[in-house]
């Protein structure tokens, strides 16, 4: 369900289509052997091909092609066995060749459909139009010198996948859910790290409004290079207001490319349709059409990992989890793996609670990732075992866990060292209860006189005296017996 915008003149609907640029995980660039490692000294990872030296020939990187195919399969999209690299011609200082090698008419991946998961638990299908491979440009740096710009070509020629969606998204929330889902799938596949703050993933947001109930798409604006989920949300909100004001006024939205300004919180015109580049696309004469072997594609398909949707379904089915819990656990592959090793052979509900509430909560407080967790999956499993066999109560377990986070010790070691083992020995508990009864004659009398809610007081006193170690079930039983006669 998309948002309906109530205007003075009637209701409007938002229409959004996204172009996501995702940097391909590969050791070397799309058409050269230069390294793609992030964070190297400027211009240390530039081959003669990347620098646009005359007469240099591009050589296609097979790993990148495999990554694109893997991604296409993971996005339930059609793999085109025949695709063509084309030159997209334009001048830019950080593009030494004077053209970007991309794919235009024949992309490597065609149409597909993915499901996005909304916060209220509903699922919506979004069409993928295509995925094509292209080169990234270099980087111009304008803020290092008062009168000069610097150019770093390390990124020039790195492989990007451009993933284009159908105009199926109807709200900022859906756009964010879509990007999140794509990012999750790419991370599961290991084809893009999805780090938007490092620029490995960025989105062009196409947006228009139309009257509710009409089919024809309105005129769109395209907001370039939006690089965080928050910015996507804010840019859509701003652009909706801007276009609404124009349309409600009887005006026409201009088809143009706009920029999102994160400091001014507004979109700004970059160029209009009339100024749009004519890129003069043509097939790159240095590169043959790319012909894939269907058997090779089939082999890649066989090596795909279990993807988020499948994993979620399995968690719900096999572990009896709620869809919500399953969604939280599968949102990262490492998290899902961690959970599975904790849950294996143990109570799934307990495992879910301990992973999602206690562990993730504690890591979040310490700003640690799961990889950096001081408590391993085996160790958390060990703690749950102590709860399950009644060695410790759930309450003591929380203290033990806090200790594990600090010391990385095994739960059993901490329980041993601190003497926290739960007392289930009825004799010992009975002795404590006798003391409590002897120390509180007035309350005993009131309780027996009908003040039922004092029972909790006796439980509390007994637990306190046992330093929380008495088994609460046994405490309740014995107290009932002693007080009620
Ligand atoms: P280009 O940006 O190169 O002109 P397309 O015309 O294929 O490419 O559109 C790119 C993106 O814009 C796609 O994601 C598509 O879904 C989206 N789009 C196209 N028309 C509209 C529209 N009227 N409103 C919103 N999104 C649109
Ligand atoms: Mg575009």
Image (tube, rainbow, N blue to C red):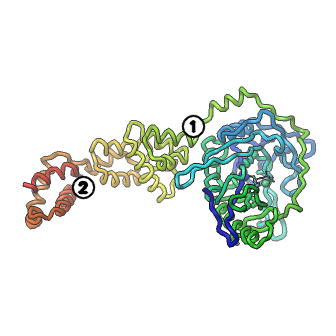
Where the N terminus falls, by quadrant? bottom right
Figure quadrant of residue 413 = top left
Q: Disc 2 designates what residue?
A: 468
* Among the two numbered marks 1 and 2 on one chain, the one whose residue lies closer to the N terminus: 1
Residue 268: percent from the left, percent from the top?
A: 77, 68
Q: Disc 1 designates what residue?
A: 306
| Camera-nearest residue between 62 and 305 | 305
Q: Mark 1: give few (<14), some (14-19) or many (20+) Cα within 10 Å.
A: some
Q: Residue at x 50, y 50 (%)?
A: 328
Q: Report whether residue 118 is seen.
A: yes
Q: Are marks 1 and 2 in contact (CB under 8 Å)?
A: no
Q: Secondary structure at mark 1?
A: loop
Q: Mark 2: give few (<14), some (14-19) or many (20+) Cα within 10 Å.
A: many
Residue 135: percent from the left, percent from the top?
A: 79, 47
Q: Quadrant of ligand 1?
A: bottom right
Give the mark toward the camera: 1 or 2. Answer: 1
Q: Residue at x 80, y 34 (%)?
A: 82
Figure quadrant of residue 438 = bottom left
Q: Is the CB atom of the residue marked by disc 2 within 8 angstroms of ligand 1's nearest atom? A: no
Residue 395: percent from the left, percent from the top?
A: 30, 54
Q: Residue at x 68, y 29 (%)?
A: 298
**Rendered view: 281 above or below 277:** above
Query: Residue farthest to the top?
Result: 295
| Camera-nearest residue between 479 and 195 | 479
């Amino acid at each position: 369900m998309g948002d309906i915008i109530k205007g003075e003149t009637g209701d409007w609907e938002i229409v959004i289509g996204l172009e996501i640029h995702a940097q391909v995980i590969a050791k070397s660039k799309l058409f050269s052997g230069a390294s793609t490692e992030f964070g190297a000294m400027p211009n240390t990872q530039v081959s003669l091909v990347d620098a646009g030296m005359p007469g240099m020939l591009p050589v296609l990187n097979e790993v990148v092609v495999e990554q694109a195919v893997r991604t296409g399969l993971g996005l339930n999209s059609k793999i085109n066995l025949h695709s063509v690299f084309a030159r997209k011609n334009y001048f830019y200082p950080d593009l030494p060749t004077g053209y970007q090698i991309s794919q235009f008419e024949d992309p490597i991946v065609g149409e597909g459909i993915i499901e996005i998961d909304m916060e209220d638990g509903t699922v919506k299908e979004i069409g993928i139009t295509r995925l094509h491979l292209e080169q990234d440009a270099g980087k111009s740096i304008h803020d290092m010198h008062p009168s000069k710009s610097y150019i770093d070509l390390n990124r020039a020629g790195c492989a990007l996948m451009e993933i284009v969606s159908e105009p199926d998204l109807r709200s900022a929330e859906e756009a964010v859910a879509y990007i999140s889902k794509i990012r999750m799938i790419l991370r599961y596949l290991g084809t893009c790290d999805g780090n938007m703050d490092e620029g490995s993933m960025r989105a062009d947001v196409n947006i228009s409004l139309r009257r509710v109930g009409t089919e024809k798409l309105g005129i769109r604006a395209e907001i370039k290079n939006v690089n965080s989920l928050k910015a996507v949300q804010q840019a859509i909100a701003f652009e909706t207001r801007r276009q609404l004001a124009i349309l409600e006024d009887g005006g026409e939205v201009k088809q143009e490319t706009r920029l999102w300004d994160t400091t001014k919180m507004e979109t700004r015109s970059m160029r209009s349709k009339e100024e749009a580049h004519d890129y003069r696309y043509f097939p790159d004469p240095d590169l043959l059409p790319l012909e894939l072997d269907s058997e090779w594609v089939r082999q890649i398909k066989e090596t795909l990992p279990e993807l988020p949707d499948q994993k979620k379904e399995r968690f719900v089915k096999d572990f009896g989890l709620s869809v919500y819990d399953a969604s939280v656990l599968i949102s990262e592959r490492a998290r899902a793996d961690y959970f599975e090793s904790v849950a294996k052979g143990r109570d799934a509900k307990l495992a879910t609670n301990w992973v999602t509430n206690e562990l993730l909560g504690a890591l979040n407080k310490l700003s640690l990732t799961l990889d950096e967790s001081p408590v391993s999956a085996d160790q958390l499993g060990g703690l749950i075992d102590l709860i399950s066999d009644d060695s410790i109560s759930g309450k003591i377990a929380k203290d033990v866990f806090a200790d594990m986070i600090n010391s990385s010790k095994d739960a059993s070691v901490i329980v041993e060292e601190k003497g926290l083992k739960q007392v289930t020995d009825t004799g010992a508990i009975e002795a404590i209860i006798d003391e409590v009864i002897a120390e509180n004659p007035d309350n005993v009398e009131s309780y027996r006189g009908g003040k039922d809610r004092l029972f909790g007081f006796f439980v509390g006193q007994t637990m306190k005296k046992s330093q929380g170690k008495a088994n609460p079930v046994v405490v309740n039983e014995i107290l009932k017996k002693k007080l009620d006669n």
